[in-house]
Each structure stands twice: as structure tokens, then as C-alpha cells.
Amino acid sequence: MEVKVENIRKEFGRFPALHDVSLDIRSGELIALLGPSGSGKTTLLRLIAGLETPTDGRIFFGTEDASEKSVQERNIGFVFQHYALFRHMTVLDNIGFGLKVRPRAIRPPKEEIRRRAKELLDLVQLSGMEGRYPTQLSGGQRQRVALARAMAVEPNVLLLDEPFGALDAQVRKDLRRWLREIHDRTGHTTVFVTHDQEEALELADRVVVMSQGKIEQVGTPDEVYDFPNSPFVYGFIGQSNCLRVQVDHGGIHFAGKPLGMAAAADKHGEAHLYFRPQDIVLTSTDEPHLEGHVTSTRRVAGTRHVELDLGNGAHAELELSPEQAASVDPKRIAFRPTRWKLFPV
Ligand code: ATP
């Protein structure tokens, strides 16, 4: 189901946790809310669930205004970081719980609940464990049961709040891939909260980058990584360089020297030039370039990271391919950014 968040503001006392947030979530999409601690991710998730009421703004499920609807009426599936499964219930009973507590008129028969719970157990690859109790499962297995339980009620939307946050790195990675596969098979509209950029970029169809109660950017993982639209996104996702430059008649200059890069003709004055360490071309010193002496270098997986002192108190980090690394002077490097963006100072 489509979910539309329209001009939502949420205040706690006088404190605005969300300012005028709007977001269209497409039916069947897996969307990640990514941002630092306190940026408002959980608040937005809880508003979609109906666990909080907005100070201003509306939330639509499909074409229906759900703003006044209760959590039950919205039919949400929830998985939290520390999802407390019922300790005294078996795995199968935990999964079937949401169906079992439905009002009689819409409750499936006992056998049907059992059949559906077993089907979901297969889906989350825990067949054979139906008789176990939560304490007899690993953390990763418990979260898989929690997901099966959330899906059992055929929710309109699945909301996952750092579901793998408490698990160790390798289990997290495995579950991430597994969640993507499950999503591709079941197609539930899913909103996933994380502060881990790798998790968001690997898992989501689209990433919503949040900071200080606002949405900074919404886009596919490629869009937010390759074309950040703000200094915050440049800094928060991946590595980036920031240099103070001068813009004059459409040309960009660093320390008085032209860089051979064109800015909008109407821009003049000081600006910040952002670029990623790998988005550069090595140049000769005969053409416009940036140049610095190498202060340190290290190998990271298949690439070489080089730190440069560009003079004037400016530094840059470059990420060179093995071929580039083999071709440069180990002491001094001339280069030019190929993909970059200017922001006001
Ligand atoms: P984290 O990654 O740490 O969970 P988050 O991005 O999910 O952070 P929220 O939990 O949405 O952030 O919180 C956003 C802001 O709203 C924070 O400054 C938080 O202190 C505040 N806040 C959240 N819930 C309440 C509440 N019930 N009462 C008062 N302030 C709150």
C-alpha cells in the first residue's frame, strides 16, 4: 500500500522533533530512513504507525486519510530492535498471535492460523523450530521470528526500527541480505530505520536521509551516494572533501589558480567545493589542476588512499585505483575533480 506523509510537524512539549516532513512511499517499496541519532527517524516511524499523533500534517494510506486511525485500524506490522517475543509461547504460537487475538468475526480458524504460521516459518527459514521457546533461539533467529510474526497479519505496511541493531556484524550482514530476499518475494511496503549507511545503501530501493528533524534528500542509493544535494549528505554518506574556493565569472579558483571547472555564470564569491575521493582524474601540471604533496598513503581493499596537503591549510583525500596509484609521483599529485558540487559558504 502507498503511504503519503504530508507536511508533518511533531513537537514534544515545545521541542520540534520533526519540521514539515513530506514523503511519498510507493506501494511495495523498501525504504530506509537514515540519519544520525536524534534526527527524527523513530518519531517518523511511530507517526506512520499511529503510535504518535502529529502536531500538524496528515498521513494517508492509499487515498484514505489515516491520520485519526488507531494502530489496529492501520494494520501495521512492527519489528523493533529489542522485540520481546512472548517468552511463554512457542515460536509457532508467537507467529500466529496476531491472528489469534483478532475479533471472532475476522479470526481465521485454528487450523488455518497454524498453516499460515508454518508457511511463514518456512519463509524465514526456521522450519523445524516451531516447538522451541524464544530463549532457545539465537538473537538473529528471534528477529526472524519477530519478522514472521509482523507479516502474519498481512500488514498494509511493515515498519522495522533498527531490527538488527543488537546483533553482531556478521549476523547483521546475513540478515540484511535475507531481508531483501524476503521483501522481493512478499512485496510488503516496508519502512526501515537505521543509522548505518552501509545497511541503508545495500538494502533499500530508496533512502531518506534525515538530519535535525528534516529530510535532507530522498533518492536511490546511487542517487544519494553519487549526487548528494547538501553538505550534510556529502559528509554523512561515504567520504568527501571540502575546499574553500573562489567563483569568478563562471570559473572556479583555488588559491588564486583556475581549476578548469565551470560554475554557473551568475555565481560569484567564496564557495565550498565538495567532491568524493574517487571522483577525480589525474592531470599533468600543464593544465588547470589542484596539486598537493603526499602526507600519507594507505591501502584499503583494492584501492590506495592518499592524503594530500594542498597548501593554504587545505587537505584532500584521494582514492586511487591500482593503475592510478602506479602512475603517480609518490610525493606530489596533480588532479581535478570530475564530479563535484558547489555550496554557499
Ligand atoms: P536514534 O537513532 O537515536 O533512535 P532518531 O533519529 O530515531 O534517533 P527520534 O527518536 O525520532 O530520533 O528523536 C528525535 C528527537 O525527538 C530527539 O531529540 C528526541 O530526544 C526527541 N524525542 C523523541 N521522543 C520524545 C518524547 N517522547 N518526548 C520528548 N522528546 C522526544
Image (spheres, rainbow, N blue to C red):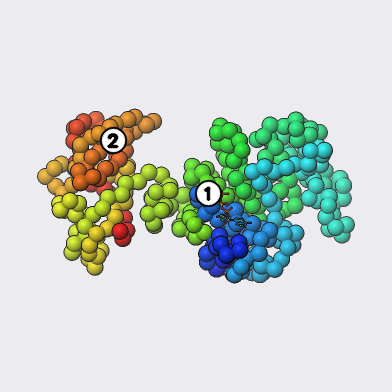
Q: Quadrant of residue 55?
A: bottom right
Badge 1 residue CB within 8 Å of ligand 1: yes
Q: Amino acid at mark 2?
A: Val
The residue under the point 21% across, 43% down is 310
Q: Residue 6 appears at what percent x and percent y?
A: 57, 68
**Residue at image coords 32%, 46%:** 241
**For mark 2, what is the residue?**
306
Residue sitting farthest toward the left: 286
Report crowding for label 1: few under 14, some 14 to 19, many 20 or more residues within 10 A (C-alpha).
Answer: few
Q: Quadrant of the N terminus?
A: bottom right
* Residue 187, percent from left and from top: 63, 51
Is 222 displayed left or right of 259 in the figure? right
> How far across and down, in percent of the image, does residue 335 sit?
22, 43
Q: Pointer 1: what residue?
A: 37
| Spatial CA span between label 2 and label 1 | 31 Å
**Number of numbered discs on residues:** 2
Secondary structure state at the residue bearing disc 2: strand
Q: In what quadrant of the picture does the C terminus appear?
A: bottom left
Kind of residue indicated by mark 1: Ser
